[in-house]
């Protein structure tokens, strides 16, 4: 694990302006935050700094506004939820740089918390320009990054700031890295990975590295259809990226060389409509009707997946096995999630899961709390799994 300073190294900070990068990129439905998990995860860092008497200045992005203010991507919409989770007053400033931010900071007492407006309302944030970073840096004495889920971005507020002032990892950043390191750094073998979901093109590259690190790779969801099609199986109208067939074949060859077992579905639950309660049937994977789509892996496949989970000492999971949001296509994901939870509770398995929809699927199965660790990170988790260095983490290690 990279060596960096943590809040344990931050003493005597009463009155200091601490810029804390958090991830407040949370789901919002009808103007209200519908899942506060990410806020709950950063609350301990904010509270600890506030209790130590720091002036806690929160930096965050929300959505992808492309460098200009967008009303429905204002962090003022998130501020009430932050206040509610912290159970503490949180002031808001309508800009993250310039006089608006400076005035709000000048009014802060020790221990106060201030949320600055969406950093992505300025083009310099994503471009990580020296000018914008310097403007942000004017507002702080110390930088704390607690946004592991945004650490794969080399932006001004996730990377640039650490070059301007002493930088520390927040409690969530620390916990995410420690948990991932425990799960994958030197994992107890056998290691089984489950990769499913719908984002085939953004995930397939990670598999060529992953098969070199794990003993078995279970492929489900839309990802499985792409591998099946690459092997000449007709997947009908299933979600499938046919143009990635060559990549899939190469991954299968790499897995063979590395001695990694590939577990593909033997059967699937197919339907002709993508809606709850749609007429469905279970078919052999080599007999998918041309006008149907596989929306879940079938019972034989689930039994095989659960056997692999039983054999595993470590499980890494990203992406649901089926379209879990619509019944009955949640069956495989729920069964595997419950089985992994049982094995974890019995002390037989270290289970680590990550990804926005994966967390939601585990919550749906009612077992998120039983996993050894559930990461809030989607993209960052995947890049970490790929073995990539995350810029927001790397810079903490090099900070003086
Ligand atoms: N066979 C399938 N056909 C169609 N959609 C599927 C299938 N299997 C899974 N999905 C869909 O995959 C989606 C989740 O995939 P995704 O790759 O986004 O997962 P994630 O990595 O956990 O989430 P995120 O990338 O948002 O952090 C779900 O909406 C689910 O309905
Ligand atoms: O939701 C996420 O995964 C993080 O907040 C990063 O967001 P981004 O993909 O828009 O950079």
Image (cartoon, rainbow, N blue to C red):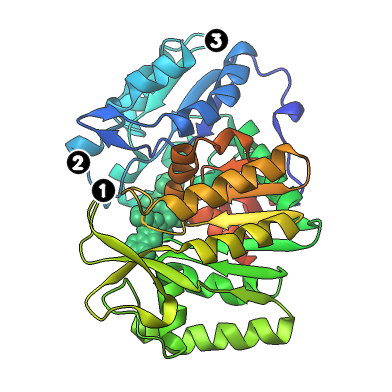
- Up-down relation of residue 286 to residue 317 (above or below): below
Residue nearest the observer in this picture, 244 or 22: 244
Residue nearest the observer in this picture, 130 or 26: 26
Assess whether mark 2 and mark 1 are in contact (beta carbons under 8 angstroms): yes
Reading the image, the residue beneath label 1 is: 65
Answer with mark 1 or mark 3, whichever residue precedes in sequence: 1
Q: Count neighbours of disc 2 (C-alpha within 10 A) and say few if under 14, some if 14 to 19, many if 20 or more.
A: some
Assess whether mark 3 and mark 1 are in contact (beta carbons under 8 angstroms): no
Q: Quarter containing ligand 1? A: bottom left
Reading the image, the residue beneath label 3 is: 110
Q: CA distance from mark 1 to mark 2?
A: 6 Å
Instruction: Residue 155: give x, y in percent of width and height.
Output: 46, 52
Assess whether mark 2 and mark 3 are in contact (beta carbons under 8 angstroms): no
Quarter of the image where the C terminus is located: top right
Total numbered labels: 3
Task: Work out whether residue 170 can be spotted.
Answer: no
- Up-down relation of residue 353 to residue 269 (above or below): above
Residue at coordinates 48% horizontally, 40% vertically from top-left? Answer: 365
Q: Is 142 placed left or right of 84 in the picture?
A: right
Q: Count neighbours of disc 1 (C-alpha within 10 A) and say few if under 14, some if 14 to 19, many if 20 or more.
A: some
Task: Work out whether residue 393 can be spotted.
Answer: yes
Answer with mark 1 or mark 2, whichever residue precedes in sequence: 1
- Which mark, residue 70? 2
Q: Quadrant of residue 294?
A: bottom left
Q: Is 285 placed left or right of 315 in the picture?
A: left
């Amino acid at each position: 694990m990279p060596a960096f300073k943590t809040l344990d190294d931050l003493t005597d900070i009463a009155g200091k302006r601490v810029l804390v990068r958090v991830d407040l990129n949370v789901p919002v439905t009808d103007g209200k935050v519908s899942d506060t998990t990410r806020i709950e995860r950063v609350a301990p860092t904010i509270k600890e700094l506030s209790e130590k008497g720091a002036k806690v200045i929160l930096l965050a992005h929300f959505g992808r506004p492309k460098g200009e203010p967008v009303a429905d991507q204002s962090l003022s919409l998130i501020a009430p939820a932050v206040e509610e989770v912290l159970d503490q007053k949180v002031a808001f400033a309508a800009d993250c740089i310039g006089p608006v931010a400076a005035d709000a900071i000048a009014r802060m007492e020790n221990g106060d918390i201030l949320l600055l407006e969406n950093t992505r309302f300025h083009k310099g944030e994503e471009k990580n320009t020296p000018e914008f970073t310097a403007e942000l840096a004017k507002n702080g004495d110390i930088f704390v990054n607690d946004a592991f889920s945004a650490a794969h971005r080399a932006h001004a507020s996730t990377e640039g700031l650490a070059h301007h002032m002493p930088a520390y990892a927040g409690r969530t950043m620390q916990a995410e890295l420690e948990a991932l390191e425990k799960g994958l750094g030197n994992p107890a073998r056998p290691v089984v990975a489950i990769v499913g979901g719908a984002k085939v093109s953004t995930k397939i590259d990670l598999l060529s590295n992953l098969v070199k690190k794990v003993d078995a790779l279970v492929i489900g969801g839309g990802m499985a259809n792409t591998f099946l099609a690459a092997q000449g199986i007709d997947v009908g109208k299933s979600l499938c990226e046919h143009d990635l067939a060559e990549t899939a074949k190469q991954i299968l060859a790499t897995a063979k060389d590395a001695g990694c077992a590939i577990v593909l579905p033997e059967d699937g639950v197919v339907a002709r409509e993508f809606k709850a309660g749609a007429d469905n049937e279970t078919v052999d994977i080599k007999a998918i009707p041309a006008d149907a789509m596989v929306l879940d892996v079938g019972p034989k496949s689930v039994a095989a997946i659960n056997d692999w989970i039983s054999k595993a000492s470590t499980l890494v999971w990203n992406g649901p096995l089926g379209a879990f949001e619509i019944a009955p296509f949640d069956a495989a994901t729920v069964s595997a999630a419950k089985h992994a939870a049982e094995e974890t509770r019995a002390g037989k398995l270290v289970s680590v899961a990550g990804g926005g929809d994966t967390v939601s699927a585990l919550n749906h199965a009612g077992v998120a709390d039983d996993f050894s660790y559930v990461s809030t990170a989607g993209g960052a988790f995947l890049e970490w799994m790929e073995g990539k260095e995350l810029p927001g983490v790397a810079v903490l290690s090099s900070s003086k």
